[in-house]
Image (spheres, rainbow, N blue to C red):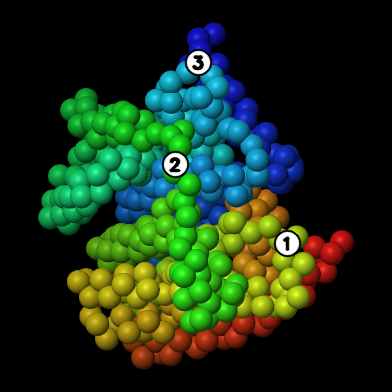
Amino acid sequence: MSRTTRLFSRMLIEEYRLHAELFGRERFLAFPVLIALLAGGGLSLFALTGTAVGTLAAGLHGLVFFFGLQVGTIGLVGRDALRDVLGDVTLLVFSARTLPVSRRRLLGVFIWKDIVYYLCFFLTPVVVGFVPVALTGGLTVPSLALLWLTVAGTFALGTGTSLALAGIATQNRGVLVAVVAALVAAVVLEPAVMVQFTPYGVFVDPGVRTAATGLLALAVVLVAGPLSFDPTSGRALRRTDPSRFRRLRSATDVHTARSLLEVTRSSGSVWKVGFSLGVLFGVALLLLDRLAAATTLDPSGGIAFGTLLGLGTFTTYNWVTQADDPAEYLRYPDGLQAVFRGKLLAFYACAAPFGAAYLAAGVLRYPAADLLVGIAVFPLVALYVFGVTAYLTGFSANELLFDTALFAVYGAALALVSVPLLVAALAHGTAPVTSTAVAVGVAAVAAAVGAVLAVRAPRRWHDRLRR
């Protein structure tokens, strides 16, 4: 067995053991089943609206690409965040100083491990969930096999793109801005041409020529990512001017100030919050455009953007709690109530500016009056997300990732709010006044529930941590 093959197999085992020990083997192995059921249910609901199978396949590729972008943010998250989440551990990807293996080989193997791992536990279940809708819509078995391959390639494209951009950022941020601007301009001005340089282009038009062009960008980013980004390089110790903490504390409270400093001093700083919400904004924009093109619906951008951006603040909650040691807070004289209140203020301070900015950017595609509804919906849904997440996970939001039972409860809680809001967004074209009133009403009730859960979360987690 070659060194690369041995590393690959060991990394797969390492990943599996890590998640199995964190969440329990039975719960973790049940996670793909839940993913397949959720994907099948969601795609079936879209099919009932009259959305064509081809449009659903396009949306699936788009979602997978953005998911790959999120997974590839190891380049933004960095080693310090992994240590905060996992404790004092050394993963193989960070062992270039102790193993006779170059960091480029380690990172390259790590990327392929991630592609295979997520293909097995996430992407394949999603494609399995798509099978009933696809067969009903006329797709053949060979087309489904091709879909599975192109979905895997699209995920790899997203992962490699994210890592390559992170690598460019470490070299020259001016170049990063230029590259991102060029890519955005190309996608906006020539979307059909850009599709030809993606694995999705192979699914749309199978052939040798499209395979060659469709895999070109994938090959470039998978090579550029490991070459440009160094996950093992040391950093100078980050120090924060004490006056920053004093200024923040004078403007708010000590817990809010601490959480804000922890986010800004971590890898990626507060910009990773903007990146996470930006991914969801892109997903929402893609889905709304595809739905409008494939159906007679005229969805509300404001309601849809406000809802999805609000749901996306789960990642913001994760960032403001990732450095916490829950047991430490039990020694504080002011109790967990003050801690969660500080987390809530830091949560809004990080997420609200980016959410407002993305809603403002929506005026390029949707009327400003429509987006005003999103300004109302976004903070209300965000409060609901904070309350549910705080109540169910406390300071360990990462447990949602592979704890099947907890994820199912959390998903059901979010669906209770997101489904009626998204239905209101889709019905906006036929009943704008009613759909707007329903959206604001549902969001307001959800916010009230979130506020109650946020108030009850401190007592719940105080009792649990005392056990």
Q: Which one is earlier in the sequence, the residue at label 1 or at label 2? A: 2
Which residue is nearer to you in this view: 168 or 115?
A: 168
* Mark 3, residue position: 100
Residue occupying image coordinates x 49% and y 25%: 96
* Mark 1, residue position: 328
Q: CA distance from mark 1 to mark 2?
A: 27 Å
* Mark 2, residue position: 235
Which residue is nearer to you in this view: 45 or 200?
A: 200
Tag 1: residue type? Glu
Q: Is residue 403 above or below residue 95?
A: below
Residue occupying image coordinates x 68% and y 57%: 325
In the drawing, does residue 206 fall left or right of residue 428?
left
Q: Which one is earlier in the sequence, the residue at label 1 or at label 3? A: 3
Give how far across and how far down residue 420 sits, in percent: 50, 76
Label 1 or label 2, whichever lies nearer to me, is 2
Residue occupying image coordinates x 27% and y 75%: 360
Q: Is residue 144 above or below residue 304?
A: above
Q: Residue reaching furthest left? A: 189
Quadrant for the C terminus in the image? bottom right
Give how far across and how far down residue 205 sits, in percent: 23, 37
The local secondary structure at tag 2 comes to loop
Q: Which one is earlier in the sequence, the residue at label 2 or at label 3? A: 3
Label 2 or label 3, whichever lies nearer to me, is 2
Tag 2: residue type? Arg
Quadrant assignment, res 151: top left
Which residue is nearer to you in this view: 278 or 154?
A: 278
In the drawing, does residue 1 fall left or right of residue 354?
right
Question: Is disc 1 surrounded by few (<14), some (14 to 19) or many (20+) residues within 10 Å?
Answer: few
Quadrant assignment, res 336: bottom right
